[in-house]
Image (cartoon, coloured by chain):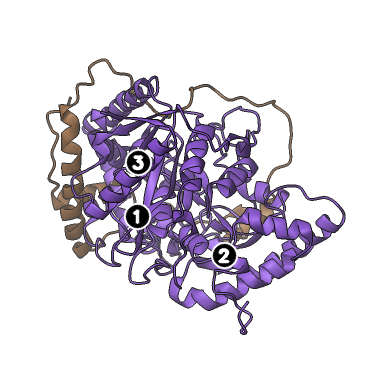
Chain colours: A purple, B brown
Amino acid sequence: MVNSGVDSGTGLTGLTAHEAQALLSSGAVSSVELTEAVLARVDQVEPQIHSYITVTRERAFEAAVAADEARSAGNVSGPLTGIPVMVKDNLSTEGVATTAGSRMLLNYTPPYDAHVVEQLRAGGAVIIGKGNLDEFAMGSSTEHSAFGATNNPWDIDRVPGGSSGGPAAGVAASECFISLGSDTGGSIRQPAALCGIVGMKPTYGLVSRYGLIAFGSSLDQVGPFARDVRDSADTLSVISGHDRRDSTSLDAPAQDFSSSLTGDISGMKLGVPREYLVDGMEPGVKAAFEKSLETLEGLGATLEEVSLPLTDQALAVYYIIAPSEASANLARYDGFKYGNAVNDVPTAWDVMDQTREQGFGPEVKRRILIGAYALSAGYYDAYYKKAQQVRTLIRREFAQTFEKFDALVTPTSPTVAFKSGEKMDDPVAMYLSDVCTIPVNIAGLPAISVPGGMSEGLPVGLQFIGPQMGDGTVLRVAHAYEQATEWHKLKPGI
Amino acid sequence: MSEEVTYELTTDEVRHIAALTRLGLSDDEVEMMRGQLSSILRVFESLQQVDTEGVEPTGHTTEVRTVLRDDSAAESLQREGILENAPDSEAGYVKVRPIFG
């Protein structure tokens, strides 16, 4: 610790959660001390990073005291007991404002916790606050938040990615050990890549969506951000499992994903889909990717180029299905039941029109309009139904590929973190940032992004994609790669 | 397949969709949305090259099944916590402006 009492993100606050847990177990540090260190770090860097929308200081200390007391009584329940964490602000927290990054939900306080928040609390985690995001998780840069943008800890003039930019930047800048995000088309993996940390989207249905503010319900999935794969596996073990309140929750027994981290991938077959090396991929990203492939071969994996031609259609499929589902999901924001309403107008219809005009930002409006158009009479077959049919073909293409391969390896995003403001007026350019992550959500597959190199002083992400329910497999490959490289140990200089 | 597929929206179409979705838009926003939505629609054009004859649509990726629960009383959210979030309420109900103006 330095004299000011604030470490620079490389001391206590820069540890992995499992390293911090070892200190807690040995009695070298208490959860209250960890929480104090993290909150001091938050005070130090938030003016530049802005990864939190809300910091719940008092609640955090209450949870830390409870975790310390449980530990003294011999009741340590798991890997996150006493560990400071952040949750994205589209995950409902009982008694704590939940905004989804939107003016629409200013002053909304959920009367209940999301399933994953219940799981974190039951696991003894210390929730520090709520992470910034693009409004309703729609965006790839966290610039579409009604509460101001989050900046990338590696270069504060650049975006952290999105939509889970706050949770990603928070872990990268040592403002929490672990965070939870949501991933509809890449909103965990792309910001993890751009911030140089690990981000995982589990198999659709593995983690309950109960209490996650809905965007695209057939695509949305909650997952962890962490500084290494072990912490990701441990967090997934805590938050996954069947929940009857989500009708798409898979009825699978709880798993300990850390048992997948064998460190051995010799003999595994990895496919390298050529369509993911898109036009416009930066040379530095491509070079880092090629070097990562050599590392994987060095670990004894067999690599083979493979073609998934329908990858080229994934962006179109996604930008029909996700906005269509969003236009239906966001119909609930009518100014009657909760949130920020314009009420001093003559009729209920005026309340709806004006509440929605003033409450939603431009990207949310674009997606509602595109979705409603794709679903409207005369266009349904050409857009929505067509996209759902191509979705079937994309799923088949992946299923056939996984008959031959254990996992696929791709870059996570075609570029490193881009400059703030660069893509704000060009929605399609912004959408292309997710071209390597979107196909995974369309097919409901598990995928993880791990630090896989540097280009121009900025992190590059490496993505592993597995078959449905192959969450353990992608964790295993990602862990072996990570342990053979040093990229995950690099920290931003903030 | 529809004959009417178009990748360029008119301002009237933007106004029509905005009305369907109960989304107030200023004239400037209508013009901005017209250009931006048209550029997004052009991304969709490539889908027409894919042969989907006889292909079942995918709604979501888990095995589709009807999830039932026991028809028994259980604890639910308290009315107070829910009504505290409503912009206006009276006598335990959400209160809204008149539907007919």
Three-letter amino acid code at the position of disc 1 = Ser
Res A305 quadrant in image: top left
Of the residues tagged 3 and 1, which is closer to the observer?
Answer: 3
Between B46 and A21, the one lying in front of the other is A21
Of the residues tagged 3 and 2, which is closer to the observer?
Answer: 3
Specify whether disc 3 shares its chain with disc 2: yes
Q: Chain of mark 3?
A: A
Q: Which residue is mark 1?
A: A140
Residues at marks 3 and 1 touching, judged by CB atoms closer than 8 Å: no
Specify whether disc 1 shares its chain with disc 2: yes
Of the residues tagged 1 and 2, which is closer to the observer?
Answer: 2
Specify whether disc 3 shares its chain with disc 1: yes
Q: Circle 1 — which element?
A: loop
Above or below for A472 versus B27: above
Three-letter amino acid code at the position of disc 3 = Glu
Res A261 quadrant in image: top right
Three-letter amino acid code at the position of disc 2 = Gly
Q: Which numbered disc covers residue A294? A: 3
Q: Chain of mark 1?
A: A
Which residue appears at 37% of the width and 21% of the height? A404
Between A465 and A219, the one lying in front of the other is A465
Q: Circle 3 — which element?
A: helix
Number of on-image labels: 3
Give the spatial CA distance, label 1 vs label 2. 26 Å
Q: Which residue is mark 2?
A: A14
Give the spatial CA distance, label 3 vs label 1. 30 Å
* Place of residue B10 in the rendered image (x, y in percent of width and height, measured from the top left): 13, 49
Which residue appears at 33% of the width and 24% of the height? A392
Question: Residue extending furthest right?
Answer: A73
* Place of residue A43 in the rendered image (x, y in percent of width and height, measured from the top left): 56, 77
Q: Is the residue marked by circle 3 packed among few (<14), some (14-19), or many (20+) residues within 10 Å?
A: few
